[in-house]
Amino acid sequence: MNNRIKAIFFDIDGTLVSFKTHKVPQETKDAIIQLRKQGIKVFVATGRMLPMVKVLDDIEFDGYVTYNGACCVDSTKSNVIFKNTIPQKELDALVERLKWDNFPVSFMCKEEMYVNYKAQIVWDVAKLVNVDPPVVRDPELIIKEDVYQLCVYVGKDKMEQIIRETLQSCEESRWIEMFADVNIKGLNKQYGIDRMLEHFNISLDETMAFGDGGNDIPMLKHVPYSVAMGNAPDHVKEAAVYVTTSVDDNGVVNALKHYDILA
């Protein structure tokens, strides 16, 4: 049995949760229970906001890296280990821009996700990951709250222009082409993992991560035992040490067996 691994980080969509069933396969749930019995700490590392990890409520985790690393909490979901938010100056500039350049933007706050208007693409993404659509709200009111992450529903060229002109301290990542996750530069799943490892006093050398999307690439390149799901695109697979089967074909369990972590 492989005793080197002390912590494992799991992405949600396309890794733990199937896009087909919107559920975690039972074999994966059983594996996570077994990992914890073996003394391995298990964490979530997701681009979702904290209230949107309810799909995992029947599984016990040791902590959550949410908003692509912008907020890290322990198993209680209330004890904040690390947080950082989009600078107010840039939120102000974004709201001003939206007055003449009206593209859809979701604002991920602490308790709620808001959007500036009801665009079909926003509802399509919500349906894809089986969550409630964001609440439509005036952006000037939204940015009175802390905003941990933005989801901007534009193409890559347009997104680069918005960052260059309006959100200079931010960068984008994508796990699907329909929108970009926008966070502060350098604030990603890799950064969140490091904060979590510091808190639990675990070495990076003892860490594994599973992912399938573009926003998983920083953590897959960072940890020594990185696993890309079989349903991941090629550029994500290239970032990982090992490629397993798909989420719908016991990908998590098969990789854990490959590394001799599970019998």
Image (cartoon, rainbow, N blue to C red):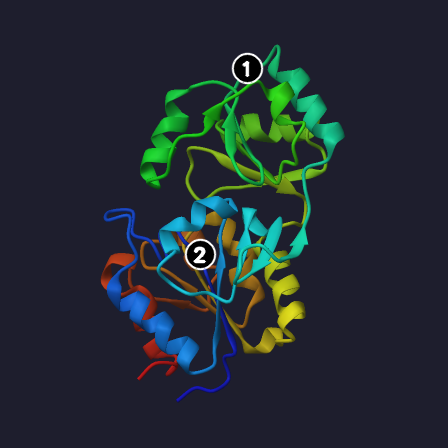
Residue at the outermost right position: 89
Residue 8 screen position, x and y as percent? 48, 70
Badge 1: residue crowd in 10 Å (few <14, some 14–19, many ≥20):
few
Residue 68 screen position, x and y as percent? 56, 49
Question: Which residue is denoted by mark 1 in the rendering?
Answer: 102
Residue 74 screen position, x and y as percent? 57, 62
Q: Nearer the viewer, residue 79 or 246?
A: 79
Q: Is residue 166 visible?
A: no
Question: Which residue is denoted by mark 2 in the rendering?
Answer: 11
Q: Residue at x 68, y 44 (%)?
A: 185
Three-letter amino acid code at the position of disc 1: Asn
Element on which disc 2 rests:
loop
Three-letter amino acid code at the position of disc 2: Asp
Ranked by sequence position, the earlier of labels 2 and 1 is 2
Residue 99 is drawn in which quadrant? top right
Asked whether, in this view, residue 45 is left or right of residue 143, the answer is left
Of the 4 image quadrants, the one containing the C terminus is bottom left
Q: Vertical placement of 55 versus 32: above or below?
A: above
